[in-house]
């Protein structure tokens, strides 16, 4: 029995003189990561978090930026700290992504040491009772054979 939300099994409808056919697209595709290839390659192959640094003002960016938004200088690749602090957090009870099958899960702002801005990332081995603003966390990576070069190859855990 098809899901009720599967539009492929809904009847056609009419608008003015036209027939409207509900349908679904499921598209497999390949995409180049372009300038961000360094980030994904180092994540997958070497379990490193690569950010960028402005050569003029010294700002570190993670997620990496190709240029500094203060100086407009081209940034250079650098490995950034794998440790940081939680700035905010939430428990998520519904997953809308095939990449995150387990629910509930926890995500939050993680401000890596030395970088300019926090990122939003997955945080594991926590509960709403243990997770708190300012909590020290460290990156943990899937084992090499399980890493696919995608953002879910790493997550944060309490740094105890
Ligand atoms: Zn700069």
Image: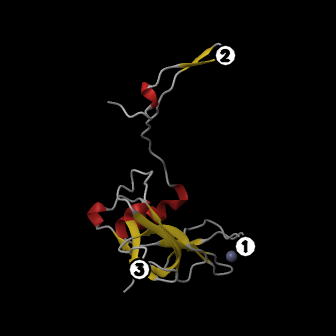
Task: State the separation of the CA atoms marked 2 and 1.
Answer: 53 Å
Label 1 within 8 A of ligand 1 by Cβ: yes
Local SS, label 3: loop
Query: Do callouts 3 and 1 mark residues in contact (Cβ within 8 Å)?
Result: no
Residue pictured at 63% horizontal, 76% vertical: 54
Q: Position of residue 34 (x, y in %)?
A: 53, 55
Q: Secondary structure at mark 2?
A: loop
Query: Where 101 sits versus 28, above or below?
Result: below
Residue 38: % across, % down: 47, 64
- How far apart marks 3 and 1 lie (CA) works out to 37 Å
Q: Nearer the viewer, residue 74 or 142?
A: 142
The image shows a total of numbered marks equal to 3
Q: Which mark is residue 130?
A: 3
- Res 16 label: 2
Q: Residue 121: image x %, image y %?
A: 48, 67
Query: What secondary structure is found at the residue carrying circle 1?
Result: loop
Q: Nearer the viewer, residue 125 or 120?
A: 125
Please rate how many residues cluster around mark 2, counting C-alpha atoms within 10 Å: few if below 14, some from 14 to 19, many from 20: few
Q: Nearer the viewer, residue 157 or 113?
A: 157
| Residue 70 marker | 1
């Amino acid at each position: 029995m098809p899901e009720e939300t599967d539009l492929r099994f809904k009847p056609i409808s009419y608008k003015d003189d036209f027939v409207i056919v509900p349908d679904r697209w499921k598209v497999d595709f390949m995409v180049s990561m372009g300038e961000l290839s360094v980030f994904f390659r180092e994540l997958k192959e070497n379990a490193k978090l690569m950010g960028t640094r402005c050569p003029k003002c010294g700002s570190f960016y993670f997620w990496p930026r190709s240029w500094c938004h203060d100086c407009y200088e081209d940034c250079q690749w650098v490995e950034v700290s794998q440790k940081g602090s939680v700035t905010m957090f939430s428990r998520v009870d519904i997953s809308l992504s095939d990449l995150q099958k387990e629910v509930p899960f926890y995500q939050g702002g993680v401000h890596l040491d030395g970088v300019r801005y926090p990122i939003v990332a997955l945080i594991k081995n926590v509960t709403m009772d243990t997770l708190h603003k300012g909590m020290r966390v460290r990156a943990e990576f899937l084992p090499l054979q399980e890493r696919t070069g995608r953002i879910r190859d790493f997550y944060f855990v309490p740094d105890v």
